[in-house]
Image (cartoon, helix red, strand yellow):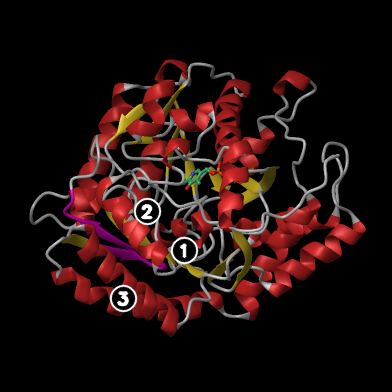
């Protein structure tokens, strides 16, 4: 083994990093001339600290994973304590306390709907995309186990994002991510997004949602008996540019799936755990999906873990003497105890710190601080759902008009402007957004608003 010697300065860091690493979601050619590469040595609260001591406000919660700030001591301690007891064990044929406690805890706080059986089963995977694969396969397989093998189609929404593995990517409608791999992908039926920003002039968000629900219904009616499940991101299509819709759509979607014997898969990987104001976005529509996919904030942003919650009805379809009717899907790190311990510590913080109440105050402050931007000549729309605030600019986004992270043009200029002023803003196409850790304070929000304002002005100069 060669001995590691830490890079002496940022130039050496850059040279060595670019010699061996391949970073995600990046055209590596853009490093370092177009896009800075920022080495980070520690994180505290809403802040990241670079190798040279520069501090950056993490306004995107490190790709929407972080909930309560970096290196949150209670979660750090829970992970350390668990690591001293049991770091991992095969989860087939074996069980452990963090895995059991987390399943019970998640089911206890999962969304409820009067007159509908609750979510009753938890299946673990280890990242968001894997949770989507699990939900798609489980949905299809449960219909098949009940003697219905005609349900081979899925319905997804336009402008959706569900991850990067082939099944999850198949359900996504972001052209730049999808186009290249199109020959390899499943072909879902796409129903129009209920996105309120795309409402007709004078149409309310609710009316727009209901009109789109009618179109969804027509799509189901045109494919009788063929649809396994509808998959959607409740309330906010995050990667699609923080497009938001009225909860009335979700109620209609629930009814339409029921009427057609199809499942509803709620992808709350980004919006779960308080981002939209409630613990889960489905609560705002009063619905329970057949599959609830959770990841990202599940561990408070500490470790990769995902969970698919489903109903006893789905589960029972797999009980049989035959192994072929069992759900044989597995990941080596399914139910990892360290990740489960982080998730339990994170759930406890919601109670200990009365997080949702604090978030209501923070969200109101975000709205106040963003309000002056509404008159900025380059701002077309400011929208907010809980702790997600998006600023849609009038810029023509680079290329196909859909959201892609720091795609170039305005987004890239805004990103570079903000990072040079100690703020991590990663615009999605021509949309700037704030999705800070919940611990963000008044001074930090002011700094974020100031830098966003100058970034807008500068990016369009
Ligand atoms: C991030 C995300 C995923 C994919 O999760 P990964 O852990 O990155 O694979 C799926 N769905 C939504 C809505 C997401 O935001």
Quadrant in the picture for residue 89 = top right
Q: Is mark 2 within 8 Å of ligand 1?
A: no
Under circle 2, the secondary element is strand
How far apart are the alpha carbons under marks 2 and 1? 10 Å
Q: Residues within 10 Å of mark 1 (few under 14, many from 20)?
A: many
Q: Counting residues from the N terminus, which is met first, the one under dot 3 or under dot 2?
A: 2
Q: Is residue 153 above or below residue 202?
A: above
Please tell me whether the stretch drawn in magenta is mainly helix, strand or loop: strand
Q: Nearer the viewer, mark 1 or mark 3?
A: 3
Please state the horizontal and vertical placement of residue 86, each as a whole percent of the image.
Answer: 89, 54
**Residue shown at 76% from the left, 52% from the top:** 5
Please state which of residues 104 and 343 is positioned toward the viewer in this rendering: 343
Alpha carbon distance from label 3 to label 2:
25 Å
Q: Which residue is mark 1?
A: 275
Q: Are marks 2 and 1 in contact (CB under 8 Å)?
A: yes
Foreground: disc 3 or disc 2: 3
Q: Which residue is mark 2?
A: 236
Residue 264 visible somewhere in the drawing: yes
What segment is highlighted magenta in the picture? 382-395
């Amino acid at each position: 083994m060669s001995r590691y010697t830490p890079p002496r300065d940022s130039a050496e860091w850059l040279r060595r990093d670019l010699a061996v690493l391949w970073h995600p979601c990046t055209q590596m050619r853009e490093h370092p001339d177009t896009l800075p590469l920022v080495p980070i040595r520690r994180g505290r609260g809403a802040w990241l600290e670079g190798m040279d001591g520069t501090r950056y406000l993490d306004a995107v919660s490190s790709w929407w994973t972080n909930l309560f700030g970096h290196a949150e001591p209670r979660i750090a301690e829970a992970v350390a304590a668990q690591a001293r007891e049991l770091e991992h064990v095969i989860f087939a044929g074996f069980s452990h306390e963090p895995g059991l406690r987390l399943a019970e805890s998640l089911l206890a706080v999962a969304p409820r709907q009067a007159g509908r059986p609750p979510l009753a089963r938890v299946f673990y995977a280890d990242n968001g995309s894997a949770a989507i694969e699990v939900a798609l396969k489980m949905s299809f397989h449960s219909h098949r186990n009940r003697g219905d093998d005609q349900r081979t189609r899925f319905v997804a929404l336009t402008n959706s994002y569900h991850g990067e593995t082939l099944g999850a990517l198949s359900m996504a409608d972001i052209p730049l991510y999808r186009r290249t791999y199109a020959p390899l992908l499943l072909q879902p039926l796409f129903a129009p997004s209920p996105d309120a920003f795309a409402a007709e002039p004078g149409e309310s968000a609710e009316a727009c949602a209901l009109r789109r629900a009618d179109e969804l219904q027509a799509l189901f009616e045109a494919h009788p008996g063929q649809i396994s499940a509808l998959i959607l991101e409740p309330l906010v299509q995050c990667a699609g540019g923080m497009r938001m819709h009225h909860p009335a759509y979700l109620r209609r979607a629930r009814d339409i799936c029921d009427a057609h014997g199809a499942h509803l898969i709620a992808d709350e990987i980004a919006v779960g755990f308080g981002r939209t104001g409630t613990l889960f976005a489905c609560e705002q529509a009063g619905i329970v999906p057949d599959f609830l996919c959770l990841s990202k904030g599940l561990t408070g942003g500490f470790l990769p873990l995902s969970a698919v919650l489903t109903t006893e009805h789905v589960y029972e379809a797999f009980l049989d003497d035959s192994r072929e009717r069992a759900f044989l899907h597995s990941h080596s790190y399914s139910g990892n105890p360290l990740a489960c311990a982080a998730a339990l510590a994170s759930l406890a913080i919601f109670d200990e710190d009365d997080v949702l109440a604090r978030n209501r105050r923070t969200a109101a402050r975000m709205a106040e601080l963003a309000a002056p931007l509404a008159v900025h000549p380059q701002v077309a729309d400011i929208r907010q759902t809980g702790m997600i605030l998006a600023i849609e600019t009038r810029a023509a986004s680079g290329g196909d008009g859909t959201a892609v992270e720091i795609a170039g043009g305005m987004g890239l200029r805004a990103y570079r402007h903000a990072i040079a002023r100690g703020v991590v803003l990663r615009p999605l196409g021509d949309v700037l957004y704030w999705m800070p850790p919940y611990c963000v304070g008044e001074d930090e929000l002011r700094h974020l608003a100031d830098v966003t304002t100058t970034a807008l002005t500068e990016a369009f100069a």
